[in-house]
Amino acid sequence: MRRVIILLLTQVLLWAVLAELNHGLAGWQLHVFGGALFVVYPALHLGRGEGLLVAGWAGLLCDAHAPVAFGTHGLLFAAAHLLLFRARERMPRHDPISQILVVLFTNLALFLGLSLLRLPVAPAPGGAWGRLLPDLLASQLTLAVVAVWFLALQDRLVRLGDAWAELRGHRG
Amino acid sequence: MPFKRFTQANPLLTLGLVVAVWLLLPTALKTLARASFFELTAPVTLAASKVRDLQDFWALRARSRTELIEAGRDLARVNASFELAVQQNEELRAEVARLEELLRLPPLRDHRLEHARVARRDFSGWWQRIVIRKGRDHGIPAGAPVVFSGGVVGRVSEVHATTAVVELISSPTMRLAGVVEGDTRPISFQGGINPTLAPPRGVVELMPLDIIANPAAPKRLVTAGFGGVFPPGLTLGTIIRADLASDGLFKSGEVELDPRLGTLTEVSVLVPAPPAAAPVRPAP
């Protein structure tokens, strides 16, 4: 449970950073979607139940700030978590390049999933891709830059939490 | 089979079960959960906004006195012209009241202006929203129109204790009735696809055939005032293109919205004033 709480706090941090970034980019009509960063670490390093809890919680956090049916992000993130969890034994999950690739592919899938859910409300669904493509490019570029840092931050905080618990165990 | 082993063997079936349970959850519970998650992160949004204000404050303190004196002089000029406009406005209000009394018309709905700072902007290709730093505690109701000096900003879509979410007119889900300035026939306006590095856009439909608009002769689109939410005459944008629609009965076109929508820092919410008590008329 300690690991889950640490990761939930990092999710709030990530959400706040993305919100600030998007606030700044609004003037240029640009948006960065970083859904994969909420999902990848729990899916690659946590147990199935714990990871699902973290991914679902992050999804609901995103849902609360989006005009979508409550649970849309939650279910997308949960699905991404389960798929990544199934495949994690077959991928070098500690290699930074692999981590970046996993983040980018997961983000692409989540972005497309959300776009397909939102397109029917657009006045010209076909033309909407002209706007979504720059958003996707900006998102993937941003994630390629920050993914390794954020995954390392999560990893370091989880290890610190483990070490602290171990120390308390020895003292106790 | 124990539940743990079932979830490990059938993760996708487990996901399906989770989806089914989620769909069956009562709406009230989901609404409560959404509000709780929003309120949980509201302090983060507000703190970030106040830090930004503090940054602006310190940046402004770095300005020279000469710049401040010049800004004060410009402001005094603007104030003088506004004072004149206020006087004219009062005369017009009195005229409207006289005509209402004469024609025994129901009075137009009055609004109170509630100014609010913008705490967060969220302009994606899927939706366009802002979060303002006033909410239920300041008497902001859901559905209230939001305006700024350039015209309509949008409509309050969610109200929380100290914040409110405003759906912008550039959002694809936003629809309202407008009229071309000087015309009375209603036109359907919808927020549109907002291209990157360009002003926000919207679309108009059901436009009468005799209205001609193109980049050389654009037409100003204003609120129609139907439905009682938006007062009439507020600027929505400029119609820059109008072509014959596929049905051949109406035109459809493109509306350019105010480019400042993407950089708003302060807006005003039009809070409907409570209906005034009907004046007691003397018996004939």
Image: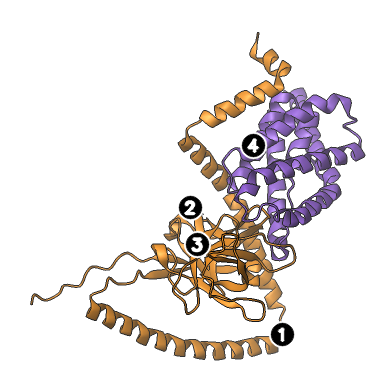
Chain colours: A purple, B orange
Tell me the amino acid under the disc marked 1: Ser
Residue to which mark 3 is pinned: B176
Tell me the amino acid under the disc marked 2: Ala
Q: Earlier in the sequence, mark 2 or mark 3?
A: 2
| Callout in the foreground (4, 2) | 4
| Callout in the foreground (1, 4) | 4
What is the C-alpha distance between the residues marked 1 and 4? 51 Å
Question: Going by the image, does B47 lie left or right of B268?
Answer: right
Q: Chain of mark 2?
A: B
Q: Chain of mark 4?
A: A
| Callout in the foreground (3, 4) | 3
Quarter of the image for residue B95 reads bottom left
Task: Report the disc number at residue B248.
Answer: none
Residue to which mark 4 is pinned: A74
| Callout in the foreground (1, 3) | 3
State the residue in front, A137 or B244.
B244
Q: Which residue is situated farthest in the top direction here?
A: B1
Q: Residues within 10 Å of mark 3 (few under 14, many from 20)?
A: many
